[in-house]
Image: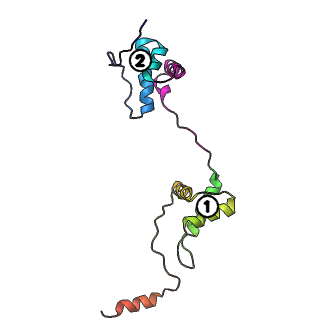
Amino acid sequence: MVTELNLSGSHRLDFPYTNNARLRTRYLVIRLFLETKNCTLVAKAAGVSRCLVNEWVGLYLTDGIEALNIKKQPGRPAKLTEKQKEQLKSYVLSHAVKDSGGRLIAEDVRAYINTTFKISYQLSNVYRLLNEMDLSWITSRSKHPKQSVEAQEEYKKTPD
């Protein structure tokens, strides 16, 4: 019975290069298993549970190296539907510049979402949501509602 594993890689299998540490651990487990055929020793050497070793080895033996790839986790479902996001985007685009002067700010967008859809968002998530909808938060300088273009032109003509 084998009591120690040779981790120096005496005969090395060619696994794809990855900078993902979790995927590298899976590749190491498979390499060690193919060398020893002992899941318990492999689990101890790799520092993972024997159940994980069994699972990864099973995936590898049935579907090959691609089966070890880490699947993207689905995450939490979005609070807003696609239709609501489109409605929000059209609101932001149509209200970006206020008639009374100034610009639409994230707090205004958050208030709109809260009153229209009855969903509350943190400001940081409002910015993330706007970014997701391909809306940049770069705006030009706002114009004061009482500014006069004629007065500006007249000021430009005055000598220094």
Q: Residues within 10 Å of mark 1 (few under 14, many from 20)?
A: many
Toward the viewer: 100 or 21?
Answer: 21
In the rendered image, which quarter is residue 117 located in? bottom right
Q: Amino acid at mark 2?
A: Leu
Is 72 placed above or below 50 here? below
Q: Amino acid at mark 1?
A: Leu
Report x, y in % for residue 94: 58, 69
The residue under label 1 is: 88
Give the mark nearest the N terminus, 2 or 1. 2
Q: Is residue 83 left or right of residue 130?
A: right
Q: CA distance from mark 2 to mark 1?
A: 53 Å
Residue in view at x 45 percent, y 17 percent = 42
Residue in view at x 37 percent, y 30 percent = 17
Instruction: Indicate yes or no whether the magenta region holds residue 31.
Output: no
Q: Main secondary structure of the magenta part?
A: helix
Report x, y in % for residue 47: 45, 24
Instruction: Indicate yes or no whether the magenta region holds residue 65.
Output: yes
Which span is picked out in magenta?
48-76
The residue under label 2 is: 32
Report x, y in % for residue 120: 64, 57
Q: Dividing the image into 4 quarters, which one contains the C terminus?
A: bottom left
Secondary structure of the residue carrying tag 2 is: helix
Secondary structure of the residue carrying tag 1 is: helix
